[in-house]
Every structure is written in C-alpha cells, then in structure tokens.
Image: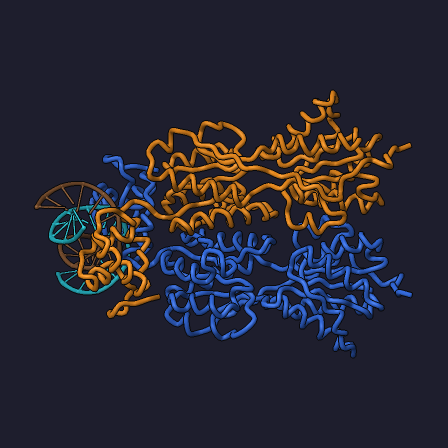
Chain colours: A orange, B blue, C brown, D cyan
Amino acid sequence: MQRDEQGGPVTIVDIARQAGVSIKTVSRVINREEGVGPQTRARVQELVEALGYRPNVSARSLSSRRSYLIGVIFMQVGAYHYVGEVQVGAMRACRRAGYHLVVEQVGAPDKMGGVQGLAGALRAARFDGLVLTPPTCDDPEVLAAVEAAGLPYVRIAPHREFERSPYVFMDDRRAAREQALRLWNMGHRRIAFIDGPADHGSAARRRQGYVEALQDRGVEPMPEWIAKGDFLSLSGFDATEALLRLAEPPTAIFAANDGMALGVLAAAAKNGLSVPRDLSVVGFDDIPEAEAAWPRLTTIHQPTAEMAEAAVEMLIDGFGDERFRTSVQVRQLDYRLVARDSAAAPSNPIVRT
Amino acid sequence: MQRDEQGGPVTIVDIARQAGVSIKTVSRVINREEGVGPQTRARVQELVEALGYRPNVSARSLSSRRSYLIGVIFMQVGAYHYVGEVQVGAMRACRRAGYHLVVEQVGAPDKMGGVQGLAGALRAARFDGLVLTPPTCDDPEVLAAVEAAGLPYVRIAPHREFERSPYVFMDDRRAAREQALRLWNMGHRRIAFIDGPADHGSAARRRQGYVEALQDRGVEPMPEWIAKGDFLSLSGFDATEALLRLAEPPTAIFAANDGMALGVLAAAAKNGLSVPRDLSVVGFDDIPEAEAAWPRLTTIHQPTAEMAEAAVEMLIDGFGDERFRTSVQVRQLDYRLVARDSAAAPSNPIVRT
DNA sequence: CTGAAAGCGCTTACAG
DNA sequence: CTGAAAGCGCTTACAG
C-alpha cells in the first residue's frame, strides 16, 4: 500500500495538502463532480495517481451511507457452473463502478440459521444492493428479508411477481420450445423431459416450453415422460434408467440442464445405447463439459455472465434514482441453440417386446 | 431493518440512551469485552436484541481499522467446482466470526487490468485478510501485490516458498502416488498421466506422485505418457485421443482432475473402447459428476470446502496475534481414495498392429 | 466497573 | 469555482 510520510495509507488530507487545496476539492475530483477548474482538477488527479491514493471505503460509506458493496445470494447446490458465471459477470460490472462483490450463502434452514442468518448478515453488511438468482429470487422468505432490510435488488430469471423488482432474463420457455421442436422435426415422437428442482423458475419455464412444443404438434405429453430431476448429473442418470424401463421408451431425452444431460449420456452408455443412433439427448446451459462429452452435447447457450453483468449495471444505475424502486426495469438477453452431435433422426427406435 | 424513533437504523446511541449507560458500555457488551457488571450487561443485551441492533460495519471499521471483510481471489477458469467449494467453506468460517467474504477476480492481463486491477481493488476494499488458491497462490505478481498492500493471507495448496505464509494443504503427491500404485497393482504397466496447467502447484504435485509410483516399481515413465492438459474436460478428451494413437497406447489413464477424466471417458467412447475393460480411467477431486459418469469414476476425494474453512479460521485467529505474520502455521487435511468402477485389471490390452 | 473525549477519513449541507 | 464546518457511528486511549 502507498503510504504518506507518517507511514499511514495516503488519505484525502495528504492529497489536499500537497495540492494546496481543501479536502472538499479533492473529494470532488475523486468523485468526478463538477465545479473544479481544469488546472486544479489535473493537479489533484496527478497527485492521486502518483501517490496511489484510494478512497477509504469505510469512511466513504459511513458518511455517504453507501457501502459500495453489492451482495449476491448463493445457495449451496453442488453444481457451481451457474454461480461461477454469475460471479464473473457481476464482478466485471462491480469493478468498473468501484463496487465490491460479497457472496452470502443461504443454506438449509438448519445450518447457520438459513434465512435467519441471511437477515442478520444483510443488516450487518449494509449492502447497497443485491442480485438474486434462482431459486432464491423466488423464495418468499428471502424476498421478505431483503425488503425488510430496505435493500434494492435485481433478480435474474425470476419466476413470479415480475412487477416486484427490476430483473434480467432470457426466454427459457421459447428456447426450450425451440429445442423440443427441433427434436420433433427430426422425427422424434416420444420425447421425454427431465425436470429441474421444483422451486426453480427456469426449470419450470423450460418444462413449459417442452410441453408447448408437443402441444403445438397436437400431442399431449404423457405424464411418465416428464421425470423428476434436481439439476445434478446423478438425477439425470437415474431418471434415464427409469425412462428406459418404460414399455415404450423415449427416442429422445431433453434434460433441463447440461449437468443432467451428462447423466443421461452416462446412463445410455450403461444400457448399451449409442447416442444419437439409439437415443437423442439434448441439454440446456452450454457448460464447458458439454463440448467435451461424447457425442458432443446439443444444448442451448445461456449468457449467464452477461445476465449478471446487466443485473449489476441496472442496480448501480438505479442507486442515483429514486424511481428505481417503483418503476420496474427489465432487460432481456438472447440465447443460442448450439447444435452439436447428440441429437439426430431416430434411426433405430427402441421398442420393448 | 429495525429503526429508532427518528426513523434511522438503530445505533449504539439509541441503545445507550434507553439503557441509561454510555456508548462505551454498549460497545463493550457488543464486543464481548470484560469490565461490565452482569446486570448492566444483561440489560444492554436485551435492548440489543429487542431493537434488532447490528453494529454498522463501516463505522466500526473506520475507527478500528478493520474491515471485517475477507477476500478470496479467484481466476476465471471455466470450471467452477473448486472455487464454489472454496467459497462455501470460507463463507461458513466467515459467518461464524461476523466477517463477510468478498470475491475478487484476477483475470488475463488484458481484461480489467489483471494484477493492476487487483492491486487497486485490494487498496480500496481494505480487506482484513486474503485467502489465496492455486494457481494465484504461487503467482509472484499477485503475492507481491498482496504483500505490498500489507495484507495477511493464508494460502491453500501452495507450491513454492512454504515459509512465506501460513497455509492449508492435503498431500496431493501421496494421494496421486497411491492412485497410480493402485493401477500398477491391478496389473497396468503402461499408465499415462494427463497433467494440469503448467503454473498449477496441485497439478505438479499430482504429476510427481504419479512419476514416483512408477519409479518405485522400477519404471521410468515415457515422456509421451505425460500429456498436457488444462483441467478442462476438452483437454482430457484431446489428450486421450493423442495417447490412443501411440504405437503402444496406455492401458490406464490417470487424469490430474475429474473434469479431464470425464473427457477421457468421452474420448474412450468415441474410440469404441469399453471402460474399464479396454482402458482404465481415474481422476482426482471427486466432483459430483464423477459419480454420475459411466462407469462411475474412481478418484481421490479432496476436502476443498474444509480446506478453505480452515484457511479462514487461521486467518481470523491470526488477526489478534502479531506473531501471525512471522510464524508459519500449517494445517493438513486428509484425502480419501474413492474406488468406483472406472479402473480394473487390464483384460484386453490394446496393441496397434 | 464505567465514561468523556478524540478521532478514524470521508461526504453532506451550506456559504461565498 | 472553492472551502470551513459538522457529522456519519463506531473504537481507541485514557482517566477515574
């Protein structure tokens, strides 16, 4: 750390003294406020850089009542690709604006107090705002805790109460519809779906898209075609084994995320099925492992990091704006269907005897 | 948030007034300091709870010169399981002690200033301490930036300069040795290894363990048996394709992490090899996907979250202790070999004609 | 066992 | 365009 003559970190007072101005003027320069002569501004700016001055976040937040901290709530899940991408995107936006990203976990009710612990952490940390992802972004208790703390927040891919806060989303439903329709158009007629966790909005919308696609083609999906899953690979594996045991097993399986699709691939291998010859498999998300699977997994690319980046931008832009809490802003990002090798026309339909 | 009569958040002054004591006494109770009569303490404690008082972190850190923020540096990698587990463990320890976990990213030098951006963020956020993971924990520039900022830090699985800081580790080398020896003892004689990134200490130690195991058995591993990888699945896939093209292909492949081992499995499938009959495959880490692979992946369980939890504990314990920066503390955690189905005796060695 | 005073490093609100 | 004063909510250092 750069230090002044006293050995302490460089403060606004050091800069002011050396520049021969008041601390208020330095403050103006730091915060890019108007009302400073160009020469004065330049001189201060130079000293700031020369001495490596950085505003003390604590002091700044104590007086301004802003913490420069943005929180992202995070559930322990076991599959971290999504939260990893969210953090990367959120951090990008935070750093641009001088904010820091704090991660808070809300776990099972028994550990660390669950929502209780979260509420305490929220009050203590004094976040300026929060980014909420599924499934926490639809959890009534979490939302109540956040609103009780008076915190502005932006949700990513919320499922309900869209008027409750600004949010960022992509059209999960349409993407899933497109994915399912593509299987139909290849000639598949028995298409199964492996669902995500029950409380997960994105999973629900993907299921809707799947159902709609079949209904569009005049088919009502059989109840047994929709298998339960939890977004983890193992559930995809287990669901597939059950689906293959049906009297008329599916010729294609659509997993609500790539992690489960990987499990489908493994179960196919276990059962001696060649993908896509004997079974087509598609996923959703486009995780790095999807490209290294064999066959390479056909999926939907979800711009997770970009969605988080947009969410933090909306949050920060809103801080200066009182209307933020009342006018609901929405940003939609695009998905992309990534056609690889795991889905093809059903050449060898499986029929149990 | 709880509010006082004025409508602002409850402060130490509110508590003091209602309890009829000075703010100093309230401060003592909050911080569990000695020198408060039991009745006074109880009365203050009750008011704290009744009013839902939470100390303002900014005010506290401004006066105490502690931020109650612990940072974890995080490289954009594409595979997030490791960082996810690190955060879960670190958060657990942070919340117990009233700290918060801030994630900072250090990316490629071109984006957001790389180490430059990190140095700036370090000065601005005033972390009380840092947890460093591979490969950043061995990056000379990162270490220099951290030390220049005067921050105490604990490393997880460092590779060099063990006397430079406290650290937490598990015996990667011995675990890898055990894993490779197990393959040998099954009857494998041509065992290949897929390495991790060049700058990654854990990868290097795992490679050492592999080499030592073969040397123990009087075999010097052929240079072409050690393939380059980057911890991502795709590199495991590509490395395997190259290994299978060798005049004498390996009968077993040891990937330095599970992500790559998944790629090995995919490449085996592509090449029509049955695992473990035609090729044995083992990994390292025990990610959730390892159990959902087919065959289920034999691997080493690494206690990642526990290592991070221990690291944060060491950090926080050290804050009160001046000797922390000079006396190097070390904590070692145990690994566990998880024998599943992807490795077996070589029944059908592959020999090219 | 308890408290009055000073100060942490900024921003806010106001004045000129 | 610039600055002096007050104050944010705590802890530190000291006194009794």
The vertical placement of A4 against B5, above or below, is: below
- Nearer to the camera, A188 or A124: A188
Q: In the rendered image, which quarter contains the C terminus of chain B?
A: bottom right
- Residue B170: image quadrant is bottom right
Q: Quadrant of residue A252?
A: top right
- Residue A14: x and y in percent read 23, 63
Which residue, as the protein is rendered here, is positioned at the far top?
Answer: A218
Point out residue D2 in the picture as x, y percentages from the top left corner. 16, 53
A163 lies above or below D10: above
Q: Residue at x 47, y 68 (%)?
A: B141
In the rendered image, the quadrant that contains the N terminus of chain B is top left
Can residue A230 be seen here? The reply is no
> In the drawing, does residue A63 fall left or right of residue A326?
left
Could you say where residue A45 lies in the image, as x and y percent from the top left? 28, 58
- Give percent across and percent down for residue A173: 61, 30
Q: Residue placed farthest to the bottom in the image?
A: B218
Of residues A153 and B267, the one nearer the viewer is B267
Q: Residue at horizontal 88%, vertical 33%?
A: A352
Query: Toward which corner of the image does residue B63 lie, by quadrant?
Result: bottom left
Relative vertical location of residue A247 with respect to residue A39 in this rendering, above or below: above
Q: How many marks?
A: 0
**Residue at image coords 88%, 61%:** B347
Does residue A273 appear to the left or right of B154 in the view shown?
Answer: right
